[in-house]
Amino acid sequence: MQKQAEHIRNIGIVAHIDAGKTTVTERILYYTGMSYKIGEVDEGSAIMDWMEQEQERGITISSAVTSCQWKDRTLNIIDTPGHVDFTIEVEEALRVLDGAVVVFCGVAGVQPQSEKVWRQANHYHLPRLVFVNKLDRIGANFRHAVESMHEKLNAHAVPIQLPLGQEQDFHGLIDLVRMRAFFWREESADEPQEGEIPAELLPEAEAAREQLLEAIVEFDDDLMTRYLDGGGLSDAEVMAGLRNAVIAGKIFPVLCGTALRNKGIQPLLDAIVDLFPAPTDVPPITARHPKSGNGQEVRCLSSGPLAALVFKIMTHVEGPMIYYTRIYSGVLESGSWVYNPGNPDKPDRKGGRERILRILQLHAGKVTQVQKASAGEIVGLLGLKETVSGDTLCRQQQPLVLATIPVPAPVIFVAIEPSSQADQKNLDESLRQLMKEDPTFHVQKSEDTGQTIISGMGELHLEVLVERILREHRVKARIGKPQVALKETITDTVEAEHTFDRQTGGREHYGRVHLRVSPNKRGQGFAFFSEVTEQQIPKHYTNTIEQALRDTMGSGVLAGYPVVDVNVTLFDGAFHEQHSSDMAFAVAAVSAFNDGCRRAAPVLLEPIMDVEVTSPKENTGDILEDLNSRGGKIFHMSSQDGLDSIRAYMPLSTMFGYTTDLRSLSQGRAGFSMELSHYGERRD
C-alpha cells in the first residue's frame, strides 16, 4: 500500500557501542505494536539484530531496516552499528535519512564513536534528537551528558525534558513544553501516568523551560517579538517553533529515559513524529545528468521523474539478495523496468536496464510484499542484477545520477585460500556476494604469491566476514594472520626522463617524456600537471600520459603497495608525427615515473589510528606504559568521575590483539575505541 509522504518519518538510531541503541529500537517496536514480546540484546532475542553473529556477540553488525506506525505516522527506522569497523553501515543510513535519534549513555555522555557519528550527521545536515539513555545506572548524570554535548560536539543541545530522580531512583520525566510530569511504575511496560510537577522541582523546571523558550525564539522573529513583549506562547506555538528550529538544524532537543526499564520511549516516539521532518519538508536534493553533468533539483513528488538510491545490499535469511532503496521522486512498481546510469566517475561502472521483480516492506529479518512504492518511502527490491550500493535508479528517457556514498579505504588484510580445489568455486562465489553487500570489503589476487587477499576496516570487521564465509556460506578455507594495508610515497623531488623508441607489431613506436616527481601534502593523493605545449606533445598524448600514471599508482617501487601523495609534472618531451603512439607515451611515462620514485627517497606509510582508552585511575599508569611501548604518541588526557580518558595516535600494526591485552592490564575494567586518523611514515 502506498503511503502519503507527509505521513512518513525516515529516521535512524545511532550511537556509540553499548549506549543502548538497539534496546531503544526494540522498545520502539514493542510500543508501536510491531512486536508482542520485548526483544533483549543480552539474551540474543533482539528483533533488529537478526543475524546469527549479532545475536551471539550482542552487538549490531549490519544496519537493519524496519517500518512501524505511531499516531497515524509511518516510521521507517534504520538501526545502525555502533562499532567503528562498521562505519560504512552508518554512512549508508545517514545518506538516505531525514533525521536521526542519537543515543548517549547517561553515565559516559559523549563517547568517541558518538563524536564520529555526529560529524557524519553534520555532513548530511541531518536534524537530530538526543536521547540520554541508562539514567537508572549508577553514576548517571543527565546534566553532565548535556554539558558533554556542548563541550565535545559544540552542539546547541537544549533539554525538552528533565529526569525525575536519578540512578536507581529514576522513575519519570518532566515535559518542559507542556510542563507536566510523567511517571512509570518500576520496569512496567505500561503507559506512563501523567501528573503535576513535584513542587520541589518546579523552580528547576521553570528555569529549564525559560532556557528552552529563549533558544526557540532566537530563530523566529515573530515569536521573539511576542516573547520580549511579555506575551505568553501556547504549547502549540512552542512546538511549532521548536520543530522549525530542529528541521533547520539550529536546535538539538535532548530527551531522557532508560530503555531497558521501559521509561521514556513513548515521549520519544511523540517527539519523532512531532519534530522530525516528513520527506516533503526536506529541501530538494541535487542530481546530475550522467553525461552532461548538468544539475537538477529533485523534489519529493510521486508525479516527478523517478529518482531512487540503492544504499545497501543484503542477503536475506531466506536467500534472496535485497536492495535497500530510498525513493526520492517518482514511483516504483513491481515488475517494471528501470534504468541504472552507472557511475560517471568510474568508467568501469556502466549503466543498464534492470527489472524489479518484487517490492518489499522491511521489518528487520522479515518482509512483506507490496505492489508499488512512491516518493519518500524506503523499501527493499528484488531482481536487480548489476546494481551496487550507491547506484541510482531512474527512467532511461529521464536519466539522472544522485550523489554516491563515500567509501573509506581498507586498512587491514588477510590471506584466504580454499581447503581444497573443490572449495575454490564456493569461495569465489562467497567473496563475490560479500563484496556486493559491503563496499568496504575488498578482494584481490597477490601478483607475487597468487593468494587471494581480503581487506577491510579492522580486526572485528574481517573476523565477522570470515565467520560468514565459513559458517553462513559453508566454505572450507584457511585464513592467514591479519596484516596492515601499507602504502608508499616519496620524500624528495627529482626529475626523470625516458624515451620509448621501438619497433613492435610491424610498426615503429616513439615517445619521450621528462617528468618532475615531488611529494604532495599527506592525504592529498596524486596530482598531475602539464607544462608542455601542443607542439612538444599533443593534448591527446598528454591525456594518455596522465592516465598511465594514474594506473601505475596501484603498485609502488618499494614493495608493490599503492602509491599516494605524489605530484607529477610533465615539463618536457617530444613526439613524432608518424611514429608516436599512445602505447609509446604510456610506457615512457611509467618508466620515467618508476625511475623517479626510486631516486626520490621512497618510504612506506602505515595506518595511524586515533585511539581512546577509558580506564579506572589505578590502571592508567600501566596502560600508558603499554601504549608507549607500542610506539604510541599520547596527545590528550582527561579525567572525570574516577575514570581517565587517554587519546593517542597508534600504529595499527601494534594494535592487533589489544582487546585481550587491555583486559589483562585492567582486569576487564577498561575499554577502548579506535578509528583511522591518517597514514604516517613507518618506523621499523
Image: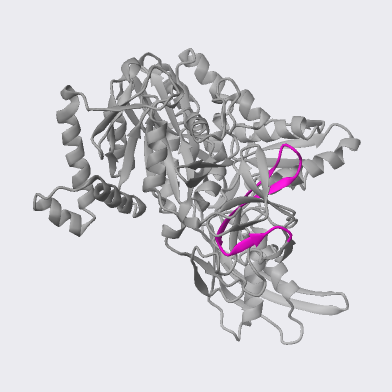
Left or right: where 461 falls relative to 17: right
Identify the residue shown where x is 85% and y is 31%.
Answer: 419
Q: Which residue occupies the extreme left position in the image? A: 229
| Magenta run includes residue 462 | no
| Magenta run includes residue 313 | yes
Left or right: where 436 falls relative to 164: right
Q: Main secondary structure of the magenta part?
A: strand
Depth check: give the residue in front, 40 or 615: 40
Quarter of the image where the C terminus is located:
top right
Left or right: where 406 falls relative to 590: left
Query: As displayed, is residue 180 above or below residue 273?
Result: above
Query: As displayed, is residue 527 above or below residue 241?
Result: below
Quadrant housing residue 148: top left
Tell me residue 238's x, y (percent): 25, 47
Query: As displayed, is residue 535 above or below residue 367?
Result: below
Quadrant housing residue 342: bottom right
Q: Which span is picked out in magenta?
A: 312-335
Tell me residue 170's x, y (percent): 32, 20
Identify the residue shown where x is 62% and y is 71%.
Answer: 399
Left or right: where 475 falls relative to 89: right
